[in-house]
Amino acid sequence: MIDKNHAENRIDIPGSASRDVSDIVMSEIDGKEILTLSDQNLQYISEKDIPEFTDEITEVQTKTGAANWYRINGLKNETVKLDIPERAAVYVYDQYGNIKYSSFMKEYNTGIPLPEYGMIVFVGDTGLTVGVSR
């Protein structure tokens, strides 16, 4: 049912389907396309703007409330070692979005095999540095 007293594009659907309505704002920040859910303080980066995880990356700075995403492209049989401080974490996903590694997994002490295609994300408190070596 459309509320004709408001000039907004909101509808009421029976049940709970319309209870979590958010305003969406599309913007460009530092040349990257960002989608923001303003009332939830959530930001999403466009996949096309996620940088590539290259050999030149030797450390990643973390920031509270933000995630540093990187695309893994064509790194067949590559392994990385990570120096992850306390209050930081790293996750690796394959091309289908399945988790392949979490820094909470104990069995990857010597190195993390990267999927040929996928994503790697670094999270942590502001001021922390995750070291990356190959």
Image: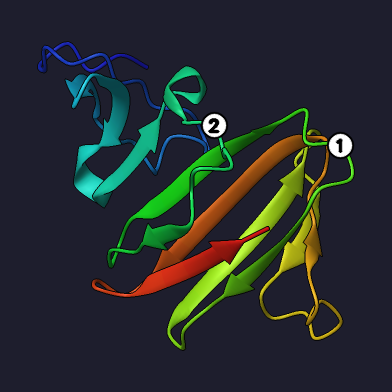
Q: Is residue 119 above or below residue 113?
A: above
Which residue type carries mark 2?
A: Glu
The C terminus - image quarter: bottom right
Residue type, numbered disc 1: Lys
Q: Is residue 104 visible?
A: yes
The residue tagged 2 is 52
Tell me where residue 9 appears, x and y as whole percent. 26, 13
Q: Looking at the image, which residue is at 44% across and 64% down?
A: 123
Q: Report the side of 7 relative to 116 (left or right).
A: left
In the picture of the structure, the residue carrying the numbered disc 1 is: 76
Q: Residue at x 47, y 30 (%)?
A: 50
Q: What label sits on residue 104 in the rendered view?
A: none
Q: Nearer the viewer, residue 60 or 58?
A: 58
* Quadrant of the rendered image containing residue 26: top left
Going 22% across and 17% down the picture, which residue do you hit? 3
Give left or right: position of 60 versus 89.
left
Q: Nearer the viewer, residue 77 or 119?
A: 77
Residue 16 visible here: no
Question: Looking at the picture, how far across and down is residue 74, in whole percent?
Answer: 78, 28
The CA span between labels 1 and 2 is: 14 Å
Nearest to N terminus: mark 1 or mark 2: 2
At mark 2, the secondary structure is loop
Secondary structure beneath disc 1? loop
